[in-house]
Amino acid sequence: MPENESPEIVLTALRAEQARIVLLDQVLSQAPPEQVMEHATDLGIELGGRRSVLVVGTVSTAVLERLRDAALLVGVRSGTVVAIVSGRVPRGAETAGLGRPGLGVTGIRTSFGEAERALEVASRLRLRGVVPFADVLPEALIGQDRETLRELVELTLEPLQSNRQGGPHYIETATTWLQEGLSVAATARALHVHERTVRYRLARIAKLTSLDLQHADDRFRLELALRGARLLDAESD
């Protein structure tokens, strides 16, 4: 305890911190929003605007101190650090999920759910830093039904993966081609190969998978399978 602070001051600060922790639990629970807002008002905390929730997968004193300087509420919950933030989101090297801004208590709860799902996907994919839910929404969606996802991946990519001569190259080329907006030239630059090589690989991918890569629905299936494979591979590691 600092020498210049009396026990009464320290006790008051501890009680205030405990009250904020209780409020955070109320916000993230099923407590009536009106009751939560009343409690927040009593503590001088404004929850009525648009707020985002950040969930950090690492619990440490450094994380808590960093977030306390910028968050309306922060606390440890189920092995993570949860922070309700407004405006600028504190950044760190730790893996964290960020929900979209929500209005009021109901919006904060929705943002919290999104942040948890974003953290789950980010952890599987070994992403670092703050990962917004919107950035991993496709993975969060397709990851909800593992068995169906596994079937899609096997049916779509097995012909490529079982091809001994070009399997890994085909997967890499397909992924890069989709990421580069279907540009053969950009794909060739990214992979450090000739454009003819990219065209040859794309033609082989189309033949082996029986997908028409000029057709949007077939490209969607291919990308879905590639994203799904990445998720499943991360889980098995």
Image (cartoon, rainbow, N blue to C red):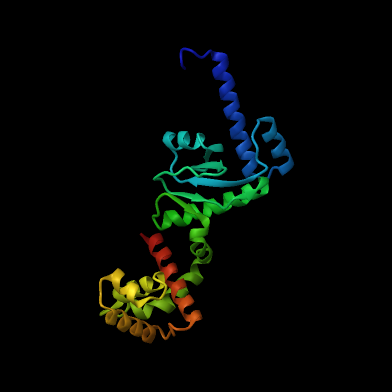
Q: How many marks?
A: 0
Residue appearing at x 49%, y 59% in the figure: 135
Evaluate whether residue 32 shows in this view: no
Residue appearing at x 60%, y 32% in the figure: 20
Give left or right: position of 159 versus 22. Answer: left
Give left or right: position of 212 versus 196. Answer: right
| Furthest-right residue in this view | 34
Evaluate whether residue 57 shows in this view: yes
Quadrant for residue 35, please give it: top right
The answer to whether residue 42 is above or below residue 113 is above
Choose between 125 and 78: the one closer to the eye.
Answer: 125
Q: Measuring from the top left, give residue 68's x and y in whole percent.
A: 51, 34
Give left or right: position of 170 versus 155. Answer: left
Choose between 110 and 159: the one closer to the eye.
Answer: 110
Q: Measuring from the top left, give residue 4's x and y in whole percent.
A: 48, 12
Quadrant for residue 13, please give it: top right
Image quadrant holding the C terminus, namely: bottom left
The answer to whether residue 127 is above or below residue 188 is above
Quadrant for residue 195, please give it: bottom left
Residue appearing at x 30%, y 69% in the figure: 190
| Furthest-front residue in this view | 185
Q: Measuring from the top left, give residue 63's x and y in whole percent.
A: 44, 38
Q: Measuring from the top left, give residue 111's x and y in whole percent.
A: 59, 51
The answer to whether residue 129 is above or below residue 224 is above
Choose between 184 and 116: the one closer to the eye.
Answer: 184
